[in-house]
Image (tube, grey):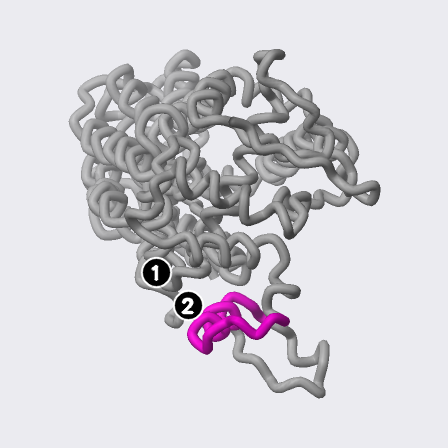
Amino acid sequence: MRYRWRPSSTAQLPFQQLLENNDLGIIDNPLRRIPEKHLREFIDSFFKESELAKVTNFTNLFRGARLARDEEAFGQEDTLTDVEKAALEKEKSRDPEEDPNKDRRREPSLWAESREIKIILLICCVASITQGWAQAAIVGANQGWPRALNLQLGRVTNGSDKATEPLVTGDVWRFSATNAIVYFAASSVGAYLSDPLTDILMGRRGAIFIAALSTFTASIGQAYAQSWRALFAWRFLLGIGMGAKSSVVPVYEVAPAQLRGKMVISWQGGTALGIALAGLVALATEDWRVRIASSAGPAIVLPFLALVGSESPRWLIKKQRYCEAYTSLLRLRENPLLAARDLVLIWAQLRRETTLFMDAEDEIINIKNEIPYLRPDAYKRQIGFFGYARRVTQLFTIPRVRRATVASFVVMTAQQLTGVNVFAFLASTLFDQGENQENPTRGSLRLYFGFGIVNFL
């Protein structure tokens, strides 16, 4: 049985139009399209089909739905307990200068957040340090591996005008390709693998585990390479792990809104710290194999942290594992009402997304301003149609998503064109020109380490 309702004459902009006419980036709340008098019936149907009675009760779920639908109106009814009020207050932050007549409200503190949020932030920090370290470990190793693997790059001695070894143009290309392949693999393979890993195979935790394991294995494998081809292959695998990891790890969906900025900073700051630590290791040892394998240190920690952290509630709901999703949200929010609120809102959003892109015409009913209630079997069938290729296509076919895609592409391309990454990943080669490669000066590595510290600060 499908539950449907007719909107009033003052309905908001139709859902379909929001895909094309959303210049402000406003995310519509689908629950607000359900009249208050119909909400109980709507949630009752969800409660029965989802078997949520195993982990919560209908009253809590319905209260969570009302909170998700209109927090201001629900709060005015004076039905919130002191614990619930405190939990809602903790989610908010306000600049005291906005209204000096109100009591000053504390800025949100990370230490006041749940244990699960702290674990997620720790995963983000360790993953970002691994990311920067794995990228930069080659910098110090560049002073040793070309000669060890029989590449002739035409090095010169102490400012001499003549090279002490012949310059083989092909070897220069091999050296450059070995350095660059990790970024090519990350952007062209690893980043695109993150979607099927996360959505189809094993969820966010599993995807992080696989990406971290790939990074660790490749970091160790590089140290045992006996030819430039082997080193090239290991770095290709490293790039796949890095690309998948950077797309999966920043788990902003589970963080309260006021902490998402800190999550972004933790990723960028951790990456810069990893680059600096790679420079420190290069100063500590002259063995290029140790330098290039050093990123395995933080990489081995990440798979175990991934198993400890919470699974993505959105992924669990998409797979119709509602009880697990509620339990995960409860650990994240530490309050049954907030967990129920987020569960219902995510579920309603997924239903709306599913109906917007339904393939089977006989399943589609008038969805301009309605939330059709899909049976579990119909929902499972339709969400299966919404596959990887279709999601990639919609990056370019939905206008508001296309604008975001183009903007991201321009910003990331501009970052490369500034040239800062040349110093980040080829510094020892640039600074070492004119030095004896058999007894490489530590000056170039000191300059690189200094760059890493400045970059982090």
Residue 165 visible in the picture: yes
Q: Residue at x 72, y 76 (%)?
A: 98
- Judged from the image, the secondary structure of the residue bearing numbered disc 2 is helix
Which amino acid type is marked by label 1? Lys
Look at the numbered discs 1 and 2 and tell me whether their residues touch, using CB distance below 8 Å.
yes
- What is the magenta range? 76-93
What distance separates the C-alpha of mark 1 from that of mark 2?
Answer: 7 Å
Residue 454 visible in the picture: no
Q: Which mark is residue 287?
A: none
Q: Is residue 229 magenta?
A: no
Name the residue beneath numbered marker 2: 110
Mark 2 is surrounded, within 10 Å at the Cα level, by few (under 14), some (14 to 19) or many (20 or more) other residues, namely some
Name the residue beneath numbered marker 1: 118
Front one among 219 and 7: 7
Which amino acid type is marked by label 2? Leu
Front one among 441 and 400: 400
Front one among 392 and 340: 340
Residue 264 in the image, given as x and y percentages of width and height: 50, 52
Which quadrant of the view contains residue 358?
A: top right
Vertical side of 126 occupied by 400: above or below: above
Pick whichever of labels 1 and 2 is earlier in the sequence.
2
Q: Residue furthest right?
A: 9
Q: Residue at x 37, y 71 (%)?
A: 111
- Judged from the image, the secondary structure of the residue bearing numbered disc 1 is helix
Q: Residue at x 38, y 38 (%)?
A: 50
Residue 413 in the image, given as x and y percentages of width and height: 61, 33
